[in-house]
Amino acid sequence: MAEFTTLARPYAKAAFIAARDASDLGGWSKALATAAAVSQVDRVKTVLSAPGLTAQQKADAFVALCGEELAEKQQNFIHVLADNRRLALLPEISVLFDLYKANQEKSLDVTVETAFEIDAATEKKLVEALSKKLDREVTLSTAVDKALLGGALIRAGDTVIDGSVRGRLAKLAEAMNV
């Protein structure tokens, strides 16, 4: 949801800056993922939305649930979110943080869907070509989708490269209906 993203962005950026300055991007990423998961538990949602609890009580309860997973600065971050009634944004904050982290590390997760399994040599060539084209370290995951008929569908962040037969047929059908 765009509104959640807009609200979460400054918090994600602040967390990212704190993590980068402390050279702890991985630790913060893990902590935010844990906090995001905890925030999605139904009973936790109920507690966080309870009108009778103060922000301090909600933050303390939340931090207690996360246990040892949160370092002191991360616990302080949870308190800031609670004070500003933004604990519900934790899943979006975590996603945005990971995007900032990937950009900082110049890495990118790429998904390649093909109609048939691809061998290790082809995977390696694909990683090299995508790394060069995208100027990022590429982590490749593959999936087989027989509906593609042939070719490949590549998803890298918000970039989609559709080189599948299905995609080409769809474009042809669209052109013929003009």
Image (cartoon, rainbow, N blue to C red):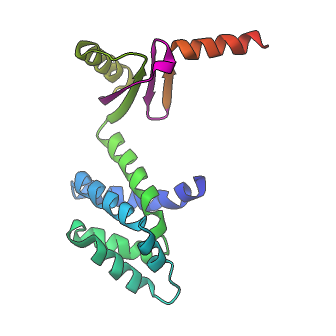
Q: Does 75 appear above or below 160?
A: below
> Where residue 124 appears, x then y in whole percent?
25, 18
Q: Residue at x 58, y 53 (%)?
A: 1
Query: Along the horizontal axis of the image, is 82 left or right of 30?
Result: right
Q: Residue at x 27, y 56 (%)?
A: 30
Q: Is residue 36 magenta?
A: no
Farthest residue to the front: give it: 146
Q: Does 27 appear above or below 148?
A: below
> Where residue 131 appears, x then y in whole percent?
32, 23
The boundaries of the magenta stretch are 137-158
Seen from the viewer's position, the closer of residues 166 and 159 is 166
Quadrant assignment for the C terminus: top right
Q: Does 44 appear above or below 17?
A: below
Where on the picture, by quarter, is residue 70? Answer: bottom left
Q: Is residue 142 magenta?
A: yes
Seen from the viewer's position, the closer of residues 136 and 30 is 30
Where on the picture, by quarter, is residue 111? Answer: top left
| Residue 177 visible in rendering | yes
Query: Along the horizontal axis of the image, is 67 left or right of 154?
Result: left
Where on the picture, by quarter, is residue 79? Answer: bottom left
